[in-house]
Image (tube, helix red, strand yellow):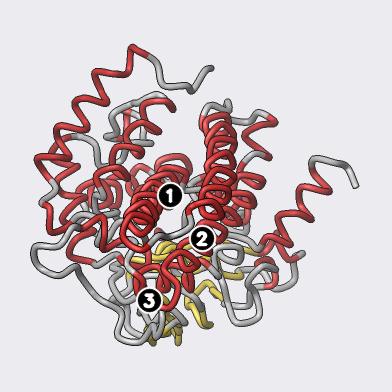
Amino acid sequence: MNAEFCADDEWLRSEVRAFLEAAVPADLRFQHDTIERQSKDTAGWIQRRLHAKGWSVPNWPVAHGGPGWTPSQQSLFHVECARVGAPLPSQFGPIMIGPVIYTFGTDAQKAQHLPGIRDGSVFWCQGYSEPGAGSDLASLKTRADRDGDDYIVNGQKIWTTQAQWADWIFCLVRTDAAAKAQQGISFLLIDMRTPGIVVRPIISIDGMHHLNEVFFTEVRVPAGNLLGAENQGWTYAKFLLANERAGLAGTAHLRVLLHHLRVRAVDMAEADSFDMSAFTRRYTELSIDVDALEALERRALCAAPGSADAAVLAMPLKLLGTTLQQNVAELGIDLAGPETLPCAGLPAAPKPGSNHADFSVSGPVLMQHYLFKRAATIYGGTSEVQRAIIAKAVLGL
């Protein structure tokens, strides 16, 4: 299937563009369009607006409340959202856990959880990483012991993005300590209001609070919250990670950021005799890299379920995309120069009356973005692990 934008999709581009231009006020644009700058209020607001239009879960099939868009149409939608600088909805519900629930969950789980994900009324977070189990996720130690109609959960998760907002957490837990690592893991859906759960903030190097530690002490979880079969959680975890990694390339936002950097560079050249030659060379090289990454992204979007492409493309897409994000972030701070320092007191919003696209390439915001993107080659599976998997699964090494 060809994922290139085609004339048949232009009606949708026009409709999406007109809707976003009318729906997203100027004072919200480019403020919450990346995960590190999200706020709960704006993430919920944009999800509700999109839900009213029928577009809140663009990757879901019609049977579960999605628009049933083709891969090309999904990509077009994300391009238009990035172009206008629309707030970014929380990804943990629509992109990550939602497809797992409607693919592997019970009818009761679908009825309970999918509506809140679609309309933005329920926020989720991801309980995967632990202090001793990040890239080596199969070594996780958080336990869930069966006790009648419940599981009793004890352990700790870390680097849990948006746990301070979340109503629910999807969590990998060990249910069979005697089994081989991947075979003794189950997938639990846990209400964050359950007694015994404590969330502690982690303030990261970008000065923001989007990460947390989550502690579980004798947390009682109904057995009906087990997703799929006991000890088969690794299967569902891999399914979710493939969706997560495929969405980490971020080509639409990369292209918009590059455009805004170029506009700033031109303005600087006109005002200060800024030498454009070095910038133009790097800008051109990175633009070509974005073109290539976008082609790979569309190929991954169009991969048939169960195909070789579906099995492996998410890995190079994540590997190349996150590296490219770091390279573009480096171009940004090189362009802004001393304006990026000090990075303390990072602005929370543009000044009234300012150009909001200019806010996205202001020095402090570019530094904040650069610092956040240092983690891009770690979260979702480190680049080193991705290379090792590609070497084994694709190259047969």
x, y (%) of residue 181? 73, 66
Up the image or down, 198 lies above or below 391; here it is below
Element at label 1? helix
Count of number-bearing discs: 3
Give the mark, 3 or 2, whose residue is nearer the N terminus: 2
What is the CA distance from the residue labelled 1 to the residue labelled 3?
18 Å
Q: Amino acid at mark 2?
A: Leu
Tell which residue pokes out farthest to the right in this image. Answer: 397
Q: Which residue is mark 3?
A: 339
Q: Is residue 394 above or below residue 74?
A: below
Looking at numbered disc 3 in the image, what kind of residue is underneath it? Glu
Residue 366: percent from the left, percent from the top?
Answer: 40, 68
Disc nearest the viewer among 1 and 3: 3
Tag of residue 258? 1
Circle 1/circle 2 CB separation < 8 Å: yes
**From where the camera sits, is residue 98 visible?**
no
Contact flag, marks 1 and 3 (Cβ < 8 Å): no
Above or below, comparing residue 178 to residue 237 in the picture: below
| Residue under the image location 65 percent in, 74 percent down | 133
In screen coordinates, is 49 left or right of 262?
left
Q: Is residue 365 left or right of residue 234?
A: left
Give residue 177's quadrant in the image: bottom right
First in residue order: circle 1 vs circle 2: 1
Query: Sequence order check: which comes first, mark 1 or mark 3?
Result: 1
Return the residue at label 2: 331
Q: Nearer the viewer, residue 75 or 271?
A: 271
149 sits to left or right of 288: left
* Callout 3–callout 2 Cβ contact below 8 Å: no
